[in-house]
Image (cartoon, grey):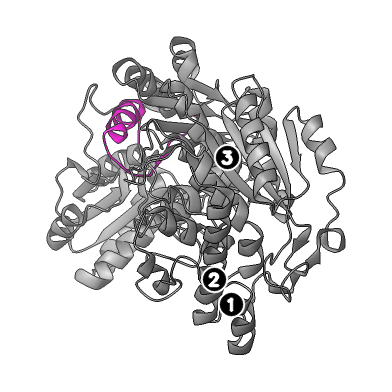
């Protein structure tokens, strides 16, 4: 269990990792990665009951699935900083022969990844499948998943949402990264999603909301609340209001950094706002 | 000859698997009766998952269920098992190398009256192009039952294709099914006929007709299109020097396409292909459709004569 102060240091270091990883290749997705840094850090360091000696079957441990695979930089950094693999490997992100593919994959046998993601909309179904197997195995551990808000435009997500409540999948906590932005612009410009809270409620999910989705204490509080609500015949969703590009002033609050890497000058400015805490890879 | 549907062979195989392996789970997208999954459902309600009409979700759930050691068998029509969910299979099953068995009924034209919206003729091609995927198309009830049981012991994604109509049940009961091993049905010296699925019976009928006109055909049942049993084909063609392929599938991407690739690389020889040529199907009885689209023993005889003339 890490203190909030320790987690803040971890998050600062993860932000540096993300920025350096995408800068090196001039490719990758920093915006969503930065926006979910606090969530994934506190999940992996304080809430997820997981074994870093990775087994694909994940028996007797909580499992996490990243459905919006393009925010792979934050997941890779969190996994490395949690001890799944050496942080030096972060330097291979998106390079030829790397296990750290542009989007996460099991193909290269990277510890911590249990399914490929990147083509959007598939992760909730996979998470539900893993949740069903937990129940069949009488394994009381939980399934966590993370999805983009724009990702909810995919039809398969709603198939999965409908299935989970109808079948009382109550060992799953699905979080939506609600930054209200996608590649082409704001959600409202691209395809207004309406009242997501009402939609989840209408589909008979329990819905929790974190208004300050980049505040460690708020996230932690809601994750604890969500865990308490499991096992009660309903799936649980968390609407996590985040700021895309959080922690870097010129990247915050705009969709422009969804899939663009900073140049040398921009990197220097971004890193100066996030000074090294745990040592760069 | 006893007439039985291949989909009932799948149902029987699944029933047997359910009894002997507690890790087998079955998922269906609102076609339990059509897929003959009712026995499994009734015997193991805790291991049967009715997904509803949501095939993409079914494939994703199946992929997730493998995490923790389950062996999911998904069941729906071949069209909804493949073209409808290609990306879900590609990313969550094939690329992720998940131990999912995609079991597909009503393949090809012979589902009959429902027409072309349901008559997938491209599925073998789509599935064989996916890395990690094993592709099997069985010929009768007994073989489908044996294949269903066999694929549970094979780790990795499998596409198992079968059909709707009752067809002759001519292979041995309780046969051992070996993935990737073709079966020589009869010896011949003039022409090799390799066929898969419902067309294996037509190939046998064709060989009898050819025998009457003194043409000796060697009939091979290729139930596994990927990995292809290269040896059995090369060994036969090295003797007969010509070959006919027969399948209830599009010529592009099917068994004939795989055989053509093999021969052109390793043993060029005259080849004729019996299959559907770049067209959609339509409503009709299975027999009418087989005749109209050129998938009967008569068509295989014609193709055999033609390929012999090219030797």
Measured Cα–Cα span from mark 1 to mark 2? 6 Å
Q: Residue at x 25, y 42 (%)?
A: B179
Alpha-carbon neighbours of circle 1 within 10 Å: few (<14), some, or many (≥20)?
A: many
Q: Which residue is mark 2?
A: A16
- Asked if the residue under mark 3 is in contact with the one under mark 2, i.e. CB atoms within 8 Å, the reply is no
In the image, residue B96 lies at what x, y percent?
Answer: 42, 51
In the rendered structure, the answer to whether residue A78 lies left or right of residue B50 reads left
Q: Which mark is residue B267?
A: none
Q: Which residue is mark 3?
A: A125
Magenta segment: B139-164
Q: Nearer the viewer, mark 3 or mark 1?
A: 1
Of the image marks 1 and 2, the number of the one nearer the N terminus? 2
Q: Secondary structure at mark 3?
A: helix
Callout 1 touching callout 2 (CB < 8 Å)? yes
Name the image quarter holding the C terminus of chain A: bottom left
- Give coordinates of residue A253: x percent, y percent: 78, 67
Q: Nearer the viewer, residue A186 or B214?
A: A186
Q: CA distance from mark 3 to mark 1?
A: 37 Å
The residue furthest bottom is A265
Which residue is tagged 1?
A271
Q: How far is disc 2 from disc 3 in space, using C-alphas?
A: 32 Å
Q: Residue at x 20, y 70 (%)?
A: B266
In the rendered view, tell whether residue B258 sits above or below residue B64: below
Residues tagged by mark 2 and mark 3 found on one chain of the structure: yes
Q: Quadrant of residue B169?
A: top left
Foreground pick, A280 / B158: A280
């Amino acid at each position: 269990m890490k203190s909030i102060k320790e987690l803040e240091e971890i998050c600062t270091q993860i932000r540096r990792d993300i920025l350096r990883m995408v800068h090196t290749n001039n490719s990758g997705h920093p915006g969503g990665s930065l926006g979910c840094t606090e969530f994934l850090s506190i999940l992996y360091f304080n809430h997820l009951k997981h074994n870093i000696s990775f087994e694909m079957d994940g028996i007797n441990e909580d499992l996490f699935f990243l459905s919006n695979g393009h925010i792979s930089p934050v997941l890779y950094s969190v996994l490395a900083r949690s001890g799944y693999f050496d942080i030096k490997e972060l330097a291979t992100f998106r390079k030829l022969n790397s296990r750290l593919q542009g989007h996460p994959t099991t193909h290269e046998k990277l510890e911590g990844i249990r399914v490929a993601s990147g083509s959007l909309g598939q992760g909730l179904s996979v998470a539900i499948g893993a949740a069903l197997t937990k129940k069949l195995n009488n394994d009381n551990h939980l399934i966590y998943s993370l999805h983009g808000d724009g990702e909810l435009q995919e039809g398969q997500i709603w198939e999965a949402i409908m299935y989970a409540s109808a079948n009382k999948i109550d060992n799953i906590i699905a979080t939506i990264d609600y930054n209200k932005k996608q590649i082409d612009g704001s959600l409202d410009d691209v395809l207004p999603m309406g009242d997501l809270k009402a939609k989840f409620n209408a589909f008979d999910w329990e819905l929790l909301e974190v208004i300050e989705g980049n505040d460690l204490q708020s996230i932690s509080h809601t994750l604890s609340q969500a865990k308490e609500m499991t096992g009660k015949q309903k799936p649980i969703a968390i609407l996590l209001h985040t700021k895309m590009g959080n922690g870097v002033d010129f990247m915050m609050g705009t969709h422009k950094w969804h899939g663009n890497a900073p140049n040398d000058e921009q990197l220097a400015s971004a890193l100066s706002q996030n000074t090294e805490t745990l040592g760069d890879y | 000859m006893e007439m039985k549907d291949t989909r009932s062979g799948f149902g029987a195989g699944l029933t047997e698997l359910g009894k002997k392996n507690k890790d087998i789970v079955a998922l269906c997208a609102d076609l339990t009766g059509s897929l003959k999954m009712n026995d499994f459902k009734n015997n193991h309600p805790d291991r049967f998952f009715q997904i509803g009409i949501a095939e993409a979700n079914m494939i994703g759930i199946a992929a997730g269920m493998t995490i923790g050691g389950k062996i999911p068998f998904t069941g729906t029509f071949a069209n909804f098992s493949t073209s409808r969910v290609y990306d879900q299979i590609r990313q969550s099953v094939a690329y992720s190398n998940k131990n999912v068995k995609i079991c597909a009924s009503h393949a090809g034209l012979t589902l009959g009256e429902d027409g072309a919206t349901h008559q997938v003729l491209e599925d073998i091609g789509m599935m064989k192009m996916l890395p990690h995927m094993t592709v099997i198309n069985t010929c009768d009830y007994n073989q489908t039952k044996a294949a269903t049981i066999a694929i549970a012991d094979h780790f990795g994604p499998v596409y198992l294709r079968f059909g709707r109509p009752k067809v002759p049940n001519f292979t041995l009961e309780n046969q051992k099914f070996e993935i990737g091993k073709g079966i020589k049905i009869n010896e011949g010296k003039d022409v090799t006929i390799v066929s898969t699925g419902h067309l294996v019976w037509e190939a046998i009928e064709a060989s009898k007709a050819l025998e009457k006109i003194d043409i000796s055909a060697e009939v091979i049942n290729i139930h596994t299109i990927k990995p292809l049993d290269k040896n059995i084909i090369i060994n036969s063609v090295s003797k007969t020097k010509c070959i006919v392929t027969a399948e209830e599938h599009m010529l592009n991407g099917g068994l004939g396409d795989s055989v053509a690739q093999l021969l052109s690389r390793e043993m060029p020889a005259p080849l004729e292909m019996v299959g559907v040529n770049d067209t959609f199907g339509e409503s009709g009885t299975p027999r009418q459709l087989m005749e109209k689209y050129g998938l009967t023993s008569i068509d295989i005889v014609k193709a055999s004569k033609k390929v012999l003339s090219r030797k």
